[in-house]
Image (spheres, rainbow, N blue to C red):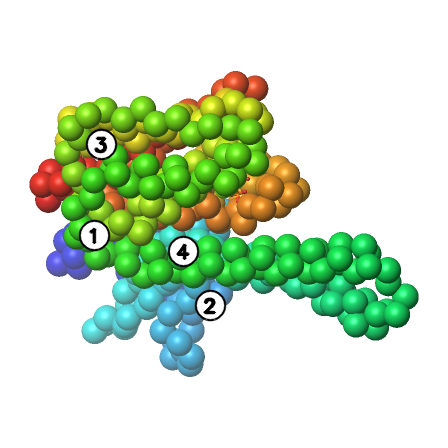
Amino acid sequence: MIEDILDALPEPALVVAGGRVRTSNEPARNILGPDIDGQDVRLAIRHPAAVERLLTANPQGPEEAELVGLGEAERRWTMSVAPLADGALFVRLSDRSEAHAAEQMRVDFVANASHELRTPLATLVGYAETLREQKAELDDPTRERFTIIVHDEARRMQRLVEDLISLSRIEAERFSTPRDALDLAHLVRDAAGGCRGLADERGSEVRLEIEPDLPPIVGDFGQILQLVDNLVTNALRYGRRGTPVRVGLGQERDMVHLTVADQGEGIPPEHIPRITERFYRVDPSRSRSLGGTGLGLSIVKHIVERHRGRLRFESEVGKGTIVHVLLPVAGAASS
Ligand SMILES: Nc1ncnc2c1ncn2[C@@H]1O[C@H](COP(=O)(O)OP(=O)(O)O)[C@@H](O)[C@H]1O
Ligand SMILES: [Mg+2]
């Protein structure tokens, strides 16, 4: 029976005949209303495009229609219609909200990335033109200053492009499991060494607190190094000058627990859920002036996901931030 088929479908489905709902399943009644059986389709589905499609005897055009705001206002559905033997119409609604949100994110990302690239590029072009056209009028110190600006802006663009490339590589590798057995203690020492320049600049020290005899994890060396580097860089940048950054490594059951702690401004709680979004910054001008691209934590998030790990932010405004990363120990990750 058609009712049995309808009830077996997880998505909203109904049968329409002669402009009325003949029968429907529970998901359909959940979004269209409990009393739609027997109702005029114009009342049951308050969506003009969909109704028109269902009332036209021999519709021209596509078999599918996009419906916005059926049930909850933000949801999007694809309605597909198939005629049954007796001339009734079998109508199915598939939820496209998630696919639509993902598509929207992609569109926003391209727009944001272009905007982020355009700003340093405009500065570059402006200063390069001045340097060329007013060669005679500029004194040496001014020319030197302009050259430094050109260089800094070019470096900023380079960092941004490098982060964009990293992000797309990590995303492309999302479904391939990393293979190297990694000694995190060794890797963390490497990463801390790589941050020495920035640490000196900030008058800060990176202190390592590493438990002995940690088991190896399975990971991608380059990516985990990048993860630690991004977290330590943030801690040094957003920590108060002259205060230490602590990097801890310990074991917690079948995970290795990495912490990066700073004493700094902290992150207001309402921002925490969003700081791993691409280009999201608590204070955009401050991030830019410190040389940030706004992509560091979203790279971290993707790396943690690829390694089937966990990421958590613990922060107190005015005191500081501790970032926790849990990564599965080699051999335990097979689940
Ligand atoms: N340790 C930290 N302390 C305070 N704020 C932080 C810290 N780490 C990250 N943030 C906030 O999260 C934002 C996003 O970080 P990230 O993705 O690394 O981008 P970027 O550092 O390039 O701005 C930063 O702009 C900053 O506002
Ligand atoms: Mg950063």
Q: What amino acid does circle 4 point to? A: Leu
Which residue is painted at 36% across and 41% down in the image? 191
Pick the residue in front: 224 or 43. 224
The residue singled out by tag 2 in the image is 52
Are discs 3 and 2 less than 8 Å apart at CB?
Answer: no
Q: Is residue 220 rendered to the left or right of residue 50?
A: left
Cα separation, mark 4 vs mark 3, equals 24 Å
Cα separation, mark 3 vs mark 1, equals 16 Å
Q: Secondary structure at mark 4?
A: helix
Are discs 4 and 3 less than 8 Å apart at CB?
Answer: no
The disc at residue 178 is: 1
The residue singled out by tag 3 in the image is 256
Q: Choose the circle earlier in sequence order: 4 or 1.
A: 4
Q: Choose the circle earlier in sequence order: 3 or 1.
A: 1
Label 1 beta carbon less than 8 Å to ligand 1: no
Judge whether 266 appears above or below 284 on screen: above
Whether residue 190 is visible: yes
Label 4 beta carbon less than 8 Å to ligand 1: no
Q: Position of residue 319 (x, y in %)?
A: 52, 18
Which residue is painted at 36% across and 73% down in the image? 63
Q: What amino acid does circle 1 point to? A: Pro
Cα separation, mark 1 vs mark 2, equals 52 Å
Cα separation, mark 3 vs mark 2, equals 59 Å
Q: Choose the circle earlier in sequence order: 4 or 2.
A: 2
